[in-house]
Amino acid sequence: MVALQARPAYIYDATLDDWVPMSGVVDTGQAYTFSAHQTFNGGVGATSTLDLKTGGTTRMSIDSSGRVTLPYQPGFLASITSNYAIAANGAVVTFNNVTSDSRSFNTGSHYNTSTYSFTAPVAGKYLFTHNSNVYSSTGVTFMPGIRINGSAVIYGTRFATNISGDNNASMSVIVNLAANDYVQPYLFVSSIMTLSGGSTTWNSFSGVLLS
């Protein structure tokens, strides 16, 4: 058996219509190997996908149309398993399920279904959404929001009506978090109300790392 020989690696640059060397990269005949902080210049062919890996696992892919996927990007979508009564003046909402339907997920397991909190694994900008559907027989005033580190609350739109029945409001916000900051869903209500449980169709709390 002939041992594989390290040799310069090349990638096709569609702009130059030529093969160009990849800086700091060695092709062993099986895969391209990058050292820390090394880069390459070049393009991806019309039918190719560029995969960036760490530890042998693809962490980012760019297809020939420029679409980027990040399969390990921290994020989640949670729901409530059963109807839930929330106390007057507000409280943290018990979003306790991340497997209720095919839309639910908890990439990286950073959302805790026991404490109803998402803990930021790294510092960055995060997008959160909170959707609440409440039932009241006498009318309702409520505001969905998020609570950061157990104190600061950011509220969304205030919803108020004198009509009984199901009522829905939602909020979304991008916040800057430090590593280990945690975020919980919070709901202000004017009186005791019931949130509809089940799938993410009725009530949901979600978040994702943007950058």
Image (cartoon, helix red, strand yellow):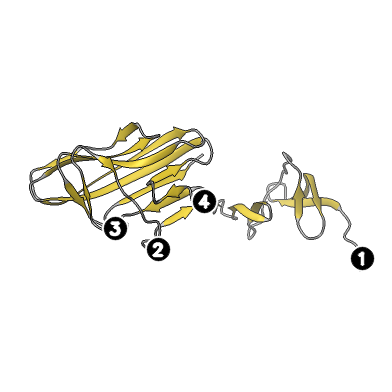
Q: Observer-nearest residue: 16 or 49? A: 49
Judging by the rendered image, the residue that carries numbered circle 1 is 2
Judging by the rendered image, the residue that carries numbered circle 2 is 102
Query: Does the image show residue 187?
Result: no
Judging by the rendered image, the residue that carries numbered circle 4 is 108
Q: Earlier in the sequence, mark 1 or mark 4?
A: 1
Q: Earlier in the sequence, mark 1 or mark 3?
A: 1
x then y, percent, for residue 29: 81, 60
Residue at 43 percent of width and 38 percent of height? 182
Residue at 31 percent of width and 60 percent of height? 199
Q: Earlier in the sequence, mark 4 or mark 2?
A: 2
Q: Residues within 10 Å of mark 3 (few under 14, many from 20)?
A: some
Query: Does the image show residue 76?
Result: yes
x then y, percent, for residue 194: 19, 51
Residue at 43 percent of width and 51 percent of height? 76
Q: Amino acid at mark 2?
A: Ser
Q: Earlier in the sequence, mark 3 or mark 4?
A: 4
